[in-house]
Image: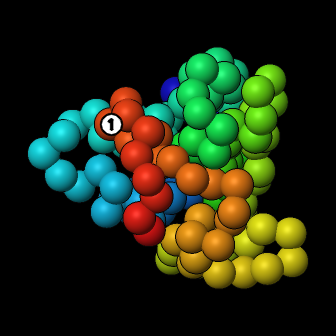
Amino acid sequence: TIDINRFEQFYFWFKSMCNIVKDFQQFYDNEKHDAMMQLFYSKKQANRMLLFQQNGTFIIHLTLKNDQVYISYKADEDNVKHEVYHRIDDEMYRFRKQSKPMFIFVRKHSALKLFYYNNVPEPKEL
């Protein structure tokens, strides 16, 4: 059995993660089943994988908190940065004091050059 308070906590977290996955369905809604596998990378896994990529390679992945995702990217030779974006509505996210659709954040972020997609860095086309 599960305590009602623990269930509610789990439920709100699960609902949050489902909404985020829905926001990114255009990335993984294709015939390549592992196309968005990195959405489920931990911060540590993202760091380890990105260290061996070109500068500007990035992934978008879940955090452990409700309504948050990371954009992690290779900033320079020995540095991976992790920025936290807060989901505020369908496909809308807040970073610092700005609120925009996620694809606008990605498109305008000059450090993000290659989206790590289906295990291959590809030029961002959001």
Location of residue 77 in the rendering, given as x and y in whole percent from the top left corner = 76, 27
Q: Would residue 111 be found to the left or right of residue 28 on screen?
A: right
Classed neighbour count for the residue bearing mark 1: other residues with Cα under 10 Å, few (<14), some (14–19), many (≥20) = some
- Residue closer to the observer: 126 or 17: 126
Question: Which residue carries the number 1 mark?
Answer: 118
Amino acid at the residue labelled 1: Asn
Q: Quadrant of residue 121?
A: top left
Measuring 41% from the left and 64% from the top, which residue is drawn there? Answer: 125
User: Helix, strand, or loop for circle 1?
Assistant: loop
Q: Is residue 63 above or below residue 1?
A: below
Report the number of numbered marks: 1
Location of residue 91 in the rendering, given as x and y in whole percent from the top left corner = 51, 74
- Residue closer to the observer: 30 or 119: 119
Q: Would residue 81 be found to the left or right of residue 102 on screen?
A: right
Q: Quadrant of residue 5?
A: top right
Would you say residue 53 is visible in this rendering?
yes
Measuring 32% from the left and 36% from the top, which residue is drawn there? Answer: 118
Measuring 44% from the left and 68% from the top, which residue is drawn there? Answer: 126
- As drawn, the residue found furthest toward the right would be 97
- Residue closer to the observer: 15 or 114: 114
Q: Would residue 100 be found to the left or right of residue 36 on screen?
A: right
